[in-house]
Image (tube, grey):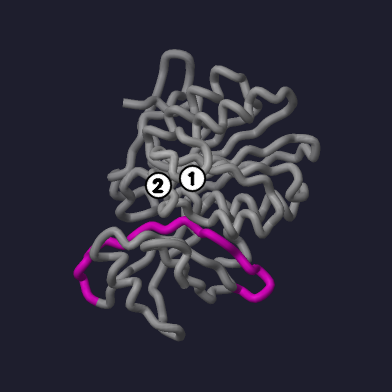
Amino acid sequence: SEMGPGALKFILKCPEIAQIVSPGQFVNVRVSNTNDPLLRRPFSVHWVDRENGLFGILFLLVGRGTAILSNYKVGDYVDLIGPLGNGFDIGEDPSCRHLLVAGGCGAAPIHFLCQTICEKFGCGSANVLLGARTSDAVLCETEFGGYGVGVSVATDDGSYGLHGTVVDLLKLKLEDPGAVRVYSCGPNVMLKAVADACIETGVISCQISLENNMSCGFGVCLGCVQKIRTGEDSWEHKRVCKDGPVFEAAEVIWE
């Protein structure tokens, strides 16, 4: 179904995945029955209905793989592997505020995260901050609003919401004292700015979901490695697909 200009939501029936997937994890989808395109495509899980064994993925029509996927019909079989990767940790503190920051298609895992936080702590504890280039590119605002969480929007061109970036919205929210956890997914330039804002403010936890190019999805091809800090003066390459895609922001070394 359409979720906005050029954005599609797929509902897939797979009880085995729906029962165990956690927010931030993804599935690797074979988009064609042939070897063209050869590589599977990773998609964050966007929504889950555990009772009925369903889950959703959200994607933008941006290339050949997603164009092929968009031609699938109701009842078609989809070849996929999952759930893969490590997801978000929402903690156990019922008094904590949760700030969910999404840029563009980063709204997909943030939506499932929002669903999970609402179920565990109630929707009053969560605020969703959405960023996009223009008003047309804002994803899932209606869906987030349906949960009853606070939703704020920023657009680069000022056509809707705050004229600025989603990080400007975040900085305003971080001015309120108290226990805060931040979660973010989107382009790297945005994630770095989110990380910097959180480090400056000293939030309890700032978790970011990286979108490095992933080919195999389970740590074999090493195509998605990222420098991750392991100590004060040490770092190592971690595999985003296997060790992530979610990392504590302070651990990520940006290049």
Residue 51 magenta: yes
Q: Work out how far the residue at label 1 is from the one at label 2, CA to CA, in angstroms.
A: 7 Å
Q: Amino acid at mark 1?
A: Tyr
SS for tag 1? loop
Closer to the camera, 36 or 237? Answer: 36
Q: Nearer the viewer, residue 26 or 242?
A: 26
Asked if residue 241 lies left or right of residue 182, the reply is: left
- The stretch of residues the image draws in magenta is 34-53
Residue 140 locus on image (x, y percent):
53, 56
Is label 2 in a helix, a strand or a loop?
loop
Q: Return the disc, 1 or 2, that comes first in the chain's sequence.
A: 2
List the single residue furthest toward the bottom. Answer: 75
Q: Are marks 1 and 2 in contact (CB under 8 Å)?
A: yes
Position of residue 85 relative to residue 194, above or below, is below
Q: Mark 2 = which residue?
A: 134
Three-letter amino acid code of the residue under disc 2: Thr
Q: Which mark is residue 160?
A: 1
* Neighbourhood count class around disc 1 (C-alpha, 10 Å): few under 14, some 14–19, many 20 upward: some
The spot of residue 124 in percent (x, y) is 76, 45
- The residue lying furthest to the right in this view is 95
**Quadrant the C terminus occupies:** top left
In magenta stretch: residue 156: no
Residue extending farthest to the top is 233
